[in-house]
Amino acid sequence: MFGQSLFGKTVMLHRSLKFLALSMACANVLYGQTTTPWDQAAGPRAPEAISLGQAIRMAEQNKSPEVVLQETRVREAKAEHYQASWSWLPYVGTYGTAGTFTTGGVARQDPLTGEFVPGNVGAVSSVNAGVGISLDLMQFARRGSEMEAAMLRANGYTAKALGSRYRQALFVTERFFDALASQHLVRAREQSLRRAEESLRIVTERVSVGKAITVDSLQAVSQRDRIISELANSRALLAGAEAALARQIGLDGRAQASDDPSFYSIRPYSDVSTLRSDAQRSPEIAGAGFLLEAAGKDLQSAKRLWLPSVRLNGNQNANAVNFRDFQIYPQSIANIQVSFAFFDGGARGRLTQQKSAAYDFAQAVAADTRREVLAAVAAQSALLQAAEQRIGLSESGIHASTEELRTQQERYSVGRATAIDLMRAQESLTRATVEQILARFDLLRSRAAIEALLGRNL
């Protein structure tokens, strides 16, 4: 009975060792892969790693639709200002006619020159030419409002285009940090896998000499397999993050983010409360303010349509016929014309109401933009401070977890700790490392978001 029990345990031990050897071989194959299905699906990497500055410059060449839209609006506003500046000049026009006609019958008086025209003259040639000038005196104020509105719109859309470029740079920066954080997470998972492989080796050796039970080895294998799965997920996330970064900077496939030591030596803001006052000068708030002023000028211009029109007209022309060898008969005309349309089909009232509604809308947009920017700055400031605290706590956690893992390894080697204690220490160190990585890149993202909102270079 005792021999059969010992024989059964020996068989189970050999099977467990074979299972461990097979699983370790499979893990080595998976861990040693240089390319994965996710790498192949995401496409080839760029030949060289790209720095953050290079990524932002490449993204500026690959403009987003929002940036192109704002720049188009700037050109339209400048064209409107150019047209309004020409409206200050009076209308000047020239005209001229020439023809031949035939008279007959009795003699009569020429209606143009007053000359006596004999009868049966035959073909008569005539020439008429002149120049006219017209200027609406009451529209000077309206033209000034139109020019000011056009210039304010150009300034507003310029500020909004600047804000769009900062948002595009922020979006590229976030994709860059996503790719870089994924690199760090992959390395953290690889280190965790190496620790799990080492623990599995130690457990296997103790099981083989009868100093540990088979369950310990099975638990070590289970932990190692779970870490392999997490590593595979991290590599998949890395491939997706690098593909997203490549798309934003105009590349095909994947773009590898280049690490920089300066990312981890960023000094915190000396006074977070000053960010609120700095946010008042952000491009988004400035652009909304310019557009609000432009809407006010448009409303002023629409109200001035209710004023009467006072137009100064001048005309100089000359007539000539071939009765006197085309003798020229000059004529000068000057007048002041005052007019007002009492019934215009409601066009003035309709335009005034439209401009008034546009002004109310611009007021609401300006107020909401200001609140939105201030709220975003406040939220990112809170996230920034939280990330700074998390970094400090994670550093303490890494130090404590490292010491705990060393202690548990020594205790397990002399049989004073279980495999579960050893694996818990390893998992604690992995969690602390991952938390530090996430906290560092959350800090970088919050810092970049604040700089973009304030209209500063990232």
Image (cartoon, rainbow, N blue to C red):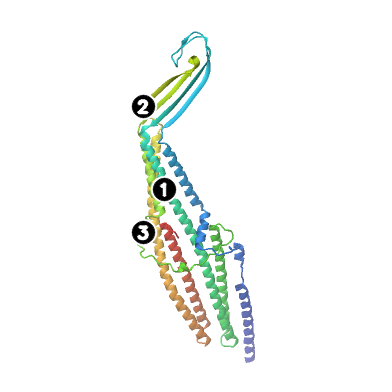
Q: Going from the N terminus, do you reach mark 3 or mark 1 first?
A: 1
Q: Is residue 1 visible?
A: no
Q: Residue furthest bottom?
A: 2
Secondary structure beneath dot 2 equals strand
Q: Residue furthest front?
A: 325
Query: How many residues crowd around disc 2 within 10 Å: few (fewer than 14), some, or many (20 or more)?
Result: some
Rendered residue at 43%/30% (across/down): 92
- Kindly report which numbered mark, 3 or 2, lies closer to the viewer in this rendering: 2
Badge 1 amino acid: Asn
Proximity of marks 2 and 1: CB atoms separated by less than 8 Å: no
Proximity of marks 3 and 2: CB atoms separated by less than 8 Å: no
Q: Position of residue 418 (x, y in %)?
A: 52, 83
Nearer to me, 435 or 58: 58
Q: Going from the N terminus, do you reach mark 3 or mark 2 first?
A: 3
Q: Which residue is mark 1?
A: 155
Give the number of the disc on residue 336: 2
How far is mark 3 from mark 1, CA to CA? Answer: 23 Å
Q: Position of residue 59 (x, y in %)?
A: 52, 57
- Kindly report which numbered mark, 3 or 1, lies closer to the viewer in this rendering: 1
Nearer to me, 13 or 101: 101
Q: Number of numbered discs present? A: 3
Q: Which residue is mark 3?
A: 276
Badge 3 amino acid: Arg
Q: Eyeballing the image, is 289 above or below 315?
A: below
| Quarter containing the N terminus | bottom right
Secondary structure beneath dot 1 equals helix
How far is mark 3 from mark 2, CA to CA? Answer: 57 Å
How far is mark 2 from mark 1, CA to CA? Answer: 38 Å
Q: Quadrant of residue 142?
A: top left
Rendered residue at 45%/13% (across/down): 115
| Horizontal side of residue 311 vs 435, given as left or right | left
